[in-house]
Image: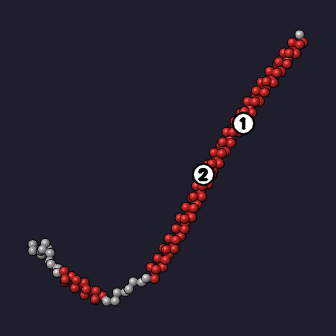
Amino acid sequence: MINKIKNYAIAFISAITAILGIYVWNAKIKKQSDLNKTNKDIEINNKKIDYAETQIKDVVEKKSKVVSNIVAKEKKIAELKQEIKEVSPEPITDVAEAKENIIKKTRRRGRRPNKNNKPDTSK
């Protein structure tokens, strides 16, 4: 009878140990799968970071090009403004000569009176 109790006790302790071992084994597998999942997420985030960094570099390069173009255009604008200030229109010295030229040109064309403009005789 004592042997049976010892056998049952050993079987009971073995069962509890087996259940505990299965639990630990499952926990270890779950921990490993969580670790793998986390590593995958870290890799994905690193790829996204690398992609974002390359985009940032591209944007910085484009920005520097645009800034250099703007600086060049501003220099051109400043030069043109300076040239505009330096240019002065020639003053008109002979108004009478201009008037003569206008009169000569209008005589050459030969102005004709307008036929539709008749004097108003109804008054």
Left or right, 114 with respect to 97, comes to: left
**Which residue occupies the foreground of this view, 32 or 112?**
32
Q: Quadrant of the C terminus?
A: bottom left
Q: Quadrant of residue 20?
A: top right
- Which residue is label 2 attached to? 51
**Which residue occupies the foreground of this view, 79 or 18?**
18
Residue 32: image tag: 1
**Which residue occupies the foreground of this view, 119 or 116?**
116
Where disc 2 sits, the SS reads helix
Where disc 1 sits, the SS reads helix
For the point 86% across and 12% down, which residue is it?
A: 4
Q: Is residue 30 above or below residue 112?
A: above
For the point 66% across and 45% down, which residue is it?
A: 43
Q: Position of residue 83 (x, y in %)?
A: 46, 80
Residue at the far right in the pictured view: 2
Image label count: 2
Q: Position of residue 57 (x, y in %)?
A: 60, 58
Q: Quadrant of residue 95?
A: bottom left
Q: Is residue 86 above or below residue 31?
A: below
